[in-house]
Amino acid sequence: MDGVSQGQGRGAPVAPDDGSLYGWEVHQVCDSRHQQGPCGTCTTEQSARSCIEAALSAGARPGVHSWGLLSRVPAGPDRPGPAAPAVPIARAALGPDGTVAWQAPGGRGPALAAEAQEAVAVGARGGSLVSVLDRFGGELRRHRLAAGLTRREVAERLRCAEAVVERTEGAGRMPSRGFAVEADRVLGAGGALAALWPSLVKSAYPDWFWQVVELEQQASFVQEFETVAVPGLLQTEDYARAVFTTAHPVAPALRIEQFVAARMDRQRILERRDPPQIMIALDEGVLRRRVGGGRTMREQLGHLLAVAELPKVCLQVIPFSVREHPGGMTPFRIMGFREGPDVLYGESFIGGQVTSDPRQLRQHQLAFNLIQANALSPHGSRVLIRRLRREIDDGPE
């Protein structure tokens, strides 16, 4: 439910015998604007091809040029990320008759790899990630020199390593909002650096999810049912990084850190003086799925316990003993506002959908109420989370 789409589900894929995976991604260009569509990883080449063909066909519409890229992702010891750059092996495009045509990369392999990497980094709203990082880094350097400070002096005042300042100035690091705000204060930039930071995260999500992010910031309450992953508002940095790396195995490191920074920034609504009421219902499988490994999941479970103690957060778990419930297996989110109608958000294979249709809202509100009634109490849910965390401590990684 957080704008991360992959064709084989959002859990970590199982590697084939040779350890390789197959990454697939679909891109669209409309009115000279690029937008990345669905992407993911599969354990077989044929499955990845099928995902591309399905996504191209489902997203076909007049005036839109779509193409897909299939890559082989070499396996490595540090899963879920690849050990070496993905190797493009085929490209697909939707023909005028609606059929998908495949083309071997041949001698264009390096060009396709560069094209794919650039496409991942380009945002439909803010230009390329590298270009906005260049701008931020240039402004950081300009204000540092204007203040008559060395990188080491700035690092000391920001309480970070000198290399952090150097890499940020060189567009080699994704700064956090906190870094931008504090650097702005230290250098007397008058808000210029802080004002630039939002442009760094505008391309972190697809276009269709940014509306959800903006609505989330205005909501007075959020009700969310999730069956696959911990909701973005409750994720730790390492968990979010593992989720995104699994869903986007060919993404550059900067793109991954951009996504993590954007996700962590969303969580600021929990720290507001008047935060929204957050009601979360999680399937027990979300807590048992060790995303990122035992250490990452243990930290995530601990974070859930801490967040669950907040006065405006209600966290409930639907145990495996509840065999049927009205939510089925489809995650959804309802957001309410002090003014205006409530909003329902749901995701599908090719994107997300936002609606204020009264009938849909009534159905999903009733479903959420019944899900809560079938779930463990908030106290019982915390007891289960503690037990699952102990199981990680006692078991293998």
Image (cartoon, rainbow, N blue to C red):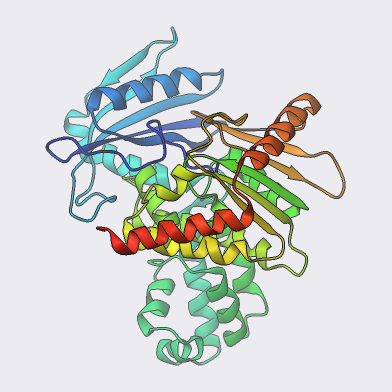
The picture places residue 14, in percent across and down from the top left corner, at: 25, 38
Residue 219 in sight from this viewpoint = no
> How many labels sit on residues?
0
Location of residue 1 (image quadrant): top right
The picture places residue 395, in percent across and down from the top left corner, at: 27, 58
The picture places residue 118, in percent across and down from the top left corner, at: 38, 45
Location of residue 33 (image quadrant): top right
Residue at (37%, 25%) from the top-left corner? Answer: 52
* Front residue (pair 250, 332): 332
Residue farthest to the right, as pictured: 339
Residue 302 in sight from this viewpoint = yes
Position of the C terminus, as image quadrant, is: bottom left
* Front residue (pair 223, 315): 315
* Front residue (pair 235, 184): 235
Residue at (55%, 59%) from the top-left corner? Answer: 382
Location of residue 356 (image quadrant): top right
Q: Is residue 73 left or right of residue 312?
A: left
Q: Is residue 80 left or right of residue 352?
A: left
Q: Is residue 23 left or right of residue 261?
A: left
Residue farthest to the top, as pictured: 97
Image: 230 above or below 89 = below
Residue at (75%, 53%) from the top-left corner? Answer: 218
Image: 303 above or below 158 = above
The picture places residue 338, in percent across and down from the top left corner, at: 86, 50
